[in-house]
Amino acid sequence: MTVLKRGRGRGLFGFLRGHPWTERRLELHITYTKSSMQYYKDNNELRDDINLMGATAIQCQDGNSICEGKTKVVQITLLSGERIFFSCCSDADIKKALKALENAGNNPSPVDRLAEKLRLDVLMKDHERILYDYIEFKGTKLPGGLDPSFDPTRAGVISLELLSEWDALIEAVFPKLYTKNSDTAQMKIFQQQEFGRKIEMHHIEYNTAKQSFADDKLVQQRLDDKIFQDKVVYVMEKEARLLEEIQELAARYNTK
């Protein structure tokens, strides 16, 4: 995007030059954890590289004295308090710039940091979106879900309701990443069958205990506990496969 950038008045003679408005090519580089803005001269010479973390952006009112007669001016306030100004060439450009700058200054969340670590930004946009939503679910719904020490097999860490929601989300997301005839799909079927066999064995044990006149409540509680623990492990194994698939996709699409 080509803009008119107001000089920052830096350098030894900056106070003499004032703040001239100069045509520059503007580029914004925004990732999950970093945001920066670069200005280039016509010959692709880098003239300024500005860190946008912690910055805010607004549109200046036309006629404001700070705009010095320019229109469609964006004001960026950096974390240091310094203000940067540039004038866009059209209404479409200023809307585009403000939209891009809207979240540029936000400090990265744990979800953003994990998304960056997994390189979701190199994936196809639909994959990136659903996987970011998945990570966001883990970070906001599951207690300590993004903590490396997160262990849902421990008693009281996760409820059956949350576990079922977690499982349903993986089931909704994972099949969108692979083909039906892939090794991943075959492994999914195998582990699904293994989980079904385990549940079947628990019910056989339950019926045997019932026939032995064991305490009904105790037998039922034991069945519920075993099924819950097996389901937790099953869901964790599915997530491990999901993360492996993400790594393979990121390696395939990463050209940097």
Image (tube, rainbow, N blue to C red):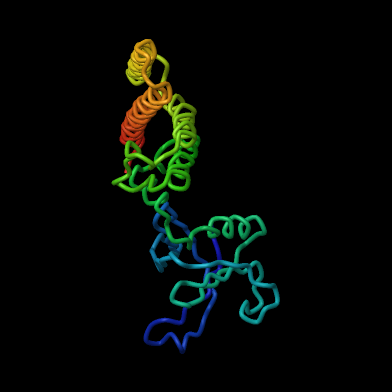
Q: Does 105 sit above or below residue 119?
A: below
Which residue shows up at 33% across the image and 19% down it? 191
- Percent of width and height locating residue 250: 34, 36
Decide if residue 186 is in sight here. Answer: no
Tell me: residue 84, above or below residue 147.
below
In the picture, residue 243 is in which quadrant? Answer: top left
Residue 193 appears at what percent x and percent y?
A: 36, 14
For the C terminus, the image quarter is top left
- Residue farthest to the left, as pictured: 149
- Of residues 208 and 226, the one drawn nearer to the viewer in this rendering: 208
**Residue at point 59% right, 55% down?**
96
Across and down, in percent, residue 249 comes to 35, 32
Query: Can residue 114 be seen in the rendering of this structure?
Result: yes
Q: List x then y, in percent, for residue 181.
A: 38, 14
Instruction: Report the residue that reaches farthest toward the right.
Output: 63
Q: Is residue 203 above or below residue 113?
A: above
- The tally of labels here is 0
Residue 157, picture quadrant: top left
At a point 43% along the width and 25% down the height, the residue shown is 217
Query: Which residue appears at 40% of the width and 66% of the height?
Result: 49
> Position of 245 compared to 131: left or right?
left
Q: Quadrant of residue 36?
A: bottom left
